[in-house]
Amino acid sequence: MADSNELAGKVAIVTGAGRNIGRAIARQLAAAGASVVVNARSNQAEADAIVREIEAAGGQAMAFLADVADPAAVEAMAQAALKRFGRIDILVNNASLRREKPIGEMSYADWREVMGATLDSAFHGVHACLPAMKKAGGGTIINIGGISAHIGSKGRAHVMTAKAALVGF
């Protein structure tokens, strides 16, 4: 973990931060001095565990459960960050669903579920956080994609499409 105060006084929201890459990003941002909102869709225990890790290392964090495919939930998360930390400087759009289903068996609902969590969520995050970033004089938005978006992956057309679309976004 980085040990610097490069991001002291900054506030970051990391979606999909309950595990894997999102968890690592949240921990690194906190190690660099940022206060971090740890987002998870439904696993409160995972989100709380990351918050405890950050706090044990001397950082500040809060857990916030929100389905980031829901614009009202993302807005509520941004407002909670502002209430607790007073600003938003960094948004990491990391949330994603990694489902597998052959395209011929995939329903439109399957397609939309992945698009909502992976692509639409980034749009919702930007809309919810941009006013606070402008007020703070700027900010950073990071969209997490993946190399598989460029090379494909069997049974994951919806996931690859959503990740590739983040490049355009």
Image (cartoon, helix red, strand yellow):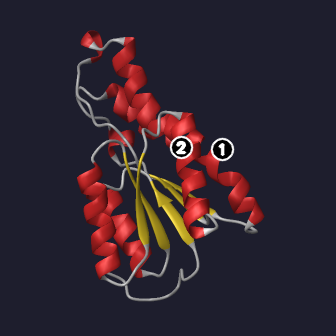
Which circle's residue, 2 or 1, is located before the other in the chain?
2
User: Disc number at residue 127?
Assistant: 1
* Residue 105 seen by the camera: yes
- Residue 116 is left or right of residue 80, and the answer is left
Tell me whether circle 2 and circle 1 mark residues in contact (CB < 8 Å). Answer: yes
User: Disc number at residue 19?
Assistant: none
Where residue 19 appears, x then y in whole percent? Answer: 26, 55
Where residue 34 appears, x then y in whole percent? Answer: 50, 75
27 over 95 or under it: above or below:
below
Q: Residue furthest front?
A: 83
**Residue appearing at x 55%, y 55% in the figure:** 80
Badge 2 crowding class, 10 Å Cα cut-off, few under 14, some 14 to 19, many 20 or more, is: many
**Residue appearing at x 35%, y 71% in the figure:** 27
Count of residue discs: 2
Of 116 and 149, the residue lying toward us: 116
**Residue appearing at x 29%, y 65% in the figure:** 50
Where residue 79 appears, x then y in whole percent? Answer: 60, 53
Q: Quadrant of the N terminus?
A: bottom left
Circle 1 SS class: helix
Foreground mark, 2 or 1? 2
Three-letter amino acid code at the position of disc 1: His
Q: Residue furthest bottom?
A: 4
- Residue 65 is left or right of residue 73, and the answer is left
11 over 64 or under it: above or below:
below
Where residue 121 appears, x then y in whole percent? Answer: 50, 39
Three-letter amino acid code at the position of disc 2: Val
* Residue 19 seen by the camera: no
The residue where tag 2 is placed is 74
Q: Quadrant of residue 152?
A: top left
- Residue 23 is left or right of residue 135, and the answer is left
**Residue appearing at x 35%, y 57% in the figure:** 22
